[in-house]
Amino acid sequence: MKGYMILVNAIAETIKTSYQSVYVKGETPLSLLLLADTDHGKSGLILNFVPEAEHLQVERLSDVSAMGLYRAVKDKSDPVVLVIPDFHAVISHKASVTEGTLNALMTLLQDGAMKISVGPGEPVELKGKRASLLTAMTPGMLVGRAGRWRKLGFLRRLLPIHYTYSEATAMRIHKSIKSGEYHVPPKHFKLPVTQPQIVRIPKPIDSEIESLAIAVSVQLENRGFTAHKFFRVFAQARALLRKHNIVDRKDFSDLMEFSKFCNLDTPQQI
């Protein structure tokens, strides 16, 4: 995929799929947490790699509060994707502020917010507004928080995409920098489908997705119910990227490759 930052094609395709998932009718769109060490391009990728699409609002947030999140979705009639390039912006505040922000995110990502009153002023009327999230952090930032975030339910609201560079990839990057050929991701891409579409998952692919989600849930240390839903949506979104309304074997193959990155503890090498 010419123009992508070197060898992060799989990550870029996953981000594109998450944006396309907002148009899978009747389903909760994908929310992703990119996990990688510093200097792996994760924040730049989610900040710059955004679609040109009608009926979609991409809200880039550098500093985050509960009220800021609610205001970001308040007047939007189109689907909203919250882009927080560095999740440190959320957890760097004092505990009481961070707690409120995490609660707001959990509400927006799954259940939908209603009428919210945060601090002085009139309550914010949200009428069940929802959003999806793209964010990034280092594995070190997750250490010491993962257990508590599991108890809160925050880690159930999104899928981790945990990756690292192999030695061979690192050497290729150095070579490309030296030669002046190092690429940054394109700032825009087009989505083929920009209206809600019903996407059917035929048998036996639906059972294979279930089995895959159960297997991956061991790595995520939960029962896998949300992962199962997200895996179905991922496959459906891949179908829409090909302008199909039925998930096929190629879509399931893409899901299997994607699932290799869904691990909190062990990164997938690229």
Image: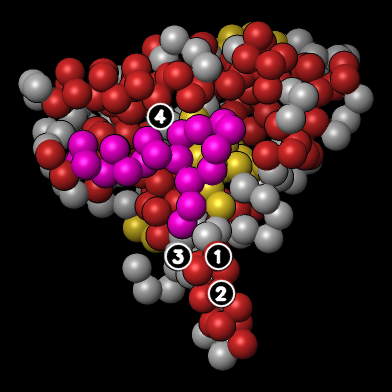
Mark 1–mark 2 CB contact (< 8 Å) = yes
Q: In this view, does 142 lie above or below 239?
A: above
Given this view, does label 3 or label 2 mark the residue nearer the observer? 2
Tell me which numbered mark, 3 or 2, is placed earlier along the sequence: 3
Query: Which stretch did the figure color magenta?
Result: 251-270
Q: Pick out the residue farthest to the bottom.
A: 179
Given this view, does label 3 or label 4 mark the residue nearer the observer? 3
Q: Mark 3 points at which residue?
A: 7
Residue 171 is tagged as 2
Q: Pick out the residue farthest to the left.
A: 203
Report the Cα–Cα distance between label 2 and label 4: 36 Å
Whole-percent x and y of residue 192? 26, 51
Q: Report helix, strand or loop for mark 1.
A: helix
Q: Mark 1 points at which residue?
A: 167
Q: In the image, 184: left or right of 257?
A: right
Q: Report helix, strand or loop for mark 4.
A: loop
Q: As shown in the figure, which amino acid type bears the numbered disc 2? A: Met
